[in-house]
């Protein structure tokens, strides 16, 4: 993977299969009722020759990864919360949950109405104004589809879109970004029945490529850089199809060994 920064070695050719990850800057603070897709469209363009009309710097087959936080802000999923009330966050988390799986102090592991199992139902107090909290989008797949459709109309470019959020992982320390909504890209690529590098047939390998793309993008977005989006270029074109986190990635409880 090449995190494009224009620095030393930027002109060195990379082999086929290389990914390029580019931060999308210049979007500014996103507020409720902002047209996020329009802001993204503007940020994905640059001035044309001789200061002519702006032209897109993205291309067909690129994947635009957008953080959940700015999607939630634009969709008005910001609520007031009393920072001095120790029970306020718990009540809010429970209202965003269909099931509480575990409790430990202030931490709740819950299942959201989307089917996500995560800490505190995705309720987040970081990178929002004091006294407020961000909730997950109501339908992140729909959010991704809308952004993709608007960008296709405004830029005449066929992009895939991933809405990402930060999740912890059972049995592993640390957090990583995963896909909570997608459009135009597979959630899971099924490699069962195909040969591995030695010719052996794979029997159980299903790759969550949408999560991998979200994690790659987070490397250039970070948590403290005010970069809410990134473009990933170079993914396998066979991954570009109609996709859905709800349909492909969220595990059916019947197949879950731990709930």
Image (spheres, rainbow, N blue to C red):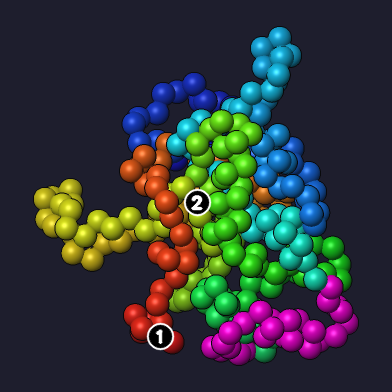
Report the residue at 56% width, 45% height from top: 148
Indicate which label's residue lies in the foreground, 2 or 1.
2
Read off the residue under disc 1: 258
Q: Tell me: residue 198, above or below residue 101.
A: above
Q: Position of residue 174 (x, y in %)?
A: 55, 67
**Spatial CA span between label 2 and label 1:** 29 Å
Q: Is disc 2 placed on a helix, strand or loop?
A: strand
Residue 130 percent across, percent down from the top left: 86, 67
Q: Residue furthest top?
A: 50
Q: Residue furthest left?
A: 199
Rendering coords of residue 98 (x, y %): 58, 84
The image's mark for residue 183 is: 2
| Residue 111 image point, x, y percent | 55, 80
- Is residue 209 or residue 238 the one in the foreground? 238
Q: Would you call the spot at circle 2 few (<14 residues within 10 Å), some (14-19), or many (20 or more)?
A: many
Within the magenta stretch, is there residue 81? yes
Task: Say what secondary structure mark 1 lies in.
Answer: loop
What's the magenta region? 80-104
Q: Quadrant of residue 238?
A: top left
- Quick check: can you spot residue 244? yes
The numbered mark at residue 164 is none
Task: For the C terminus, give its image quadrant.
Answer: bottom left
Sequence-first tag of 2 and 1: 2
From the viewer's perspective, tell me whether residue 254 is left or right of residue 124. left
Q: Residue at x 56, y 31 (%)?
A: 156
Q: Residues within 10 Å of mark 1 (few under 14, many from 20)?
A: few
Which quadrant does the N terminus fall into? top left
Q: Nearer the viewer, residue 27 or 22?
A: 27
Residue sitting at 40 percent across and 77 percent down? 252
> Is the residue 115 above or below the residue 20 in the image?
below
């Amino acid at each position: 993977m090449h995190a494009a920064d224009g620095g030393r070695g930027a002109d060195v050719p990379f082999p086929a299969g290389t990914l390029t990850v580019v931060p999308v800057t210049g979007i500014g603070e996103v507020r409720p009722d902002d047209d996020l897709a329009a802001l993204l469209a503007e940020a994905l363009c640059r001035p044309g020759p001789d200061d002519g009309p702006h032209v897109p710097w993205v291309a067909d087959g690129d994947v635009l990864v957008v953080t959940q936080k700015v999607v939630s802000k634009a969709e008005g999923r910001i609520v007031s919360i009393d920072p001095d009330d120790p029970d306020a966050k718990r009540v809010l988390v429970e209202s965003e949950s269909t099931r509480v799986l575990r409790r430990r102090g202030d931490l709740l592991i819950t299942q959201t109405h989307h089917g996500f199992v995560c800490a505190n139902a995705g309720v987040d107090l970081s990178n929002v104004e004091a006294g407020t909290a961000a909730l997950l989008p109501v339908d992140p797949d729909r959010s991704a589809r809308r952004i993709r459709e608007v960008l296709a109309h405004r830029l005449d470019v066929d992009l895939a879109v991933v809405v990402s959020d930060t999740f912890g992982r059972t049995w592993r320390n640390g957090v990583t970004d995963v896909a909570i909504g997608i459009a135009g890209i597979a959630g899971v690529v099924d490699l069962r029945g195909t040969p591995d590098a030695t010719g052996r047939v794979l029997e159980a390998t299903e790759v969550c490529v949408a999560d991998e793309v979200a994690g790659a993008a987070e490397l250039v977005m970070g948590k403290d850089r005010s970069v809410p989006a990134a473009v990933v270029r170079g993914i396998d074109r066979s991954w570009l199809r109609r996709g859905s986190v709800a349909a492909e990635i969220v595990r059916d409880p019947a197949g879950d060994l731990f709930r």
